[in-house]
Image (spheres, helix red, strand yellow):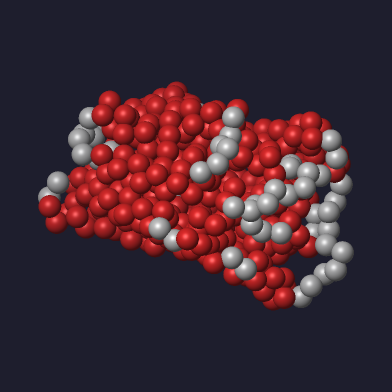
Amino acid sequence: MKKGKNFNRFLLLWTGELVSSIGGGLTSFGLGVYIFQQTGSAASMALVTLLGFLPTLLLSVPAGVLADRYDRRLLMMTGDGCSALGILYILICMMRGGATLTQICVGIFFSAVFSALLEPSFRATITDLLTREEYSQASGLVSLAGSARYLLSPIIAGFLLTVSDVKLLLVIDICTFFLTVAGAAVVRRGIGAKEAEKKEAFLQSVKGGWQALRAKKGILLLVAVSSGVTLFMGMFQILAEPLILSFSDAKTLGVAESVCACGMLVSGVVLGVKGLKGHYVHTLGLSLILAGCFMAGFPLFENIPLLCVFGFLFFAALPFANNCLDYLIRTNIPDDVQGRAWGLIGFLSQLGYVVAYAVSGAAADALGRLTGRGVGRGAAAVILAAGICLSVVAASILIPKQIKELEQQPMKEER
C-alpha cells in the first residue's frame, strides 16, 4: 500500500471521529447542565457518566476480540449507527414533557453499549492503515479529535442553550452519527474487509490478547499506572462542571471549558504536524506530573480567568502523555492481536474511571454538606487532592527499567 493513499484514508476516518466527538460533546454538556439544574447534585451527574462509561469498560474485551475476528470497519459503522438510538430515546422522552434521571440513564447506557464496539476497531484500523513512522503523527491527530468535545462542543452548546434547550443539542448529535458511518463505509470500501483467517474460540482469543500484554512486563506496568492515572483524572472530569456551575452559569461554563481545552488543541496540532522523535518514557512521566500540578491549581479560587489558565495547562499536557503511551504500547504488540490487546488495555487501564465516577460525586456532595460551603467547594477539595495524587503516581513511571526498555525496539517494516 502507498503511504500517501493510506494516510488520506486515515484522515477521512479521523474526520468522521472529529465530527462524532463534537456531537457527543454537545450531548454530554447539555445533559450535564440539565441534570445539575434539575437536581443540584454532583452525584447525579456522576451516575449518568458512570452508566455511560460502564458498557465501554465491560465490553472492551469482547469488542477487542470482535475487532480481530471480523471486519473492523463494519463494526465501527454498527457501533456508531446503533448508538444514535439511545440518544434518540432521550430526545423523545424530552419532547413528551421532560426526561427523568432514570430515562436519561437508560438512553445513555444503551448508546454506550454500541459505542463500545468502536474503540478497539478504530485503534486497530490505524495499525492496518499506517506505518510505524506515522503512528506518532496519527496519535496527535486522534488526540486533537478527542479534544474537540472539550474545545468546540462546550462553547457551541453554551451558546445554543441561550437560544434553545438541550433537545437541539441532541438532534445535532444524532445527525453526526450519519456522517461518521459514511466515512467508515468509504474507508471500508477502499481497503476491504480484514477478517482473521482462523476463528478462535472467544476465551482463546482473549487469552491471546493477555499473552501479548504479558510478553513484556513494561506494558503491564504502564497499564497498571494508567489505571491510577484514570482514577484521578476521572475525578477532575466529573467535578469540574459542578464546581463552575456552583458560582456561574451554563454559558460561562461553556466558554471556560473551551478556553481550557485550547491547551489540548495547541499540543494536538504540534504533535499532529511533527510528532515525537524519542524520549517517550520521560515525556510521558513529566507530562503527567505537570498535569497533576495544574489540576491541583484548578480549583483553588472561584475565579474564571485563573481557572482557565490552570485548565489550559492541564489539557496541554494530556496529548503528550497520550501520544507516548499509545506509541510505547502499539509498537510492542504484534499487529494480528492489536484489537484484543487494546480491548484488554482499555478494560484494565480504565478501571480507575469506574471508581472515580462512583465516589467523586458523592464525596463532593458530602464534603459540601459537612463544611456548609456547598457542592462547589466540596468538588474543589476533591480535585485538589486528586491532582496531588496524580503527580505522585506519574512519577513512578520514570523508575522501572522494564518501562524504559519499551522504546528500545527495532523499527517495524513499512507496509
Front residue of 268 and 190: 268
Q: Is residue 377 left or right of residue 251?
A: left
Residue 411: x and y in percent read 70, 48
Taking depth in this image into account, of 370 and 291 the one nearest to the observer is: 291
Instruction: Specify whether 368 is left or right of 197.
Output: left
Q: Tell me if residue 304 comes above or below residue 135 in the rendering.
A: above
Q: How many marks?
A: 0
Q: Quadrant of residue 216?
A: bottom right
The image quadrant of residue 22 is: top right
Give the quarter of the figure containing the C terminus: top right
Residue depicted at x 67% and y 63%: 340
Quarter in which the N terminus is drawn: top right
Residue 37: x and y in percent read 33, 41
Q: Residue at x 48, y 27 (%)?
A: 266
Q: Position of residue 207 (x, y in %)?
A: 67, 74
> Do we see residue 379 in this rendering?
no
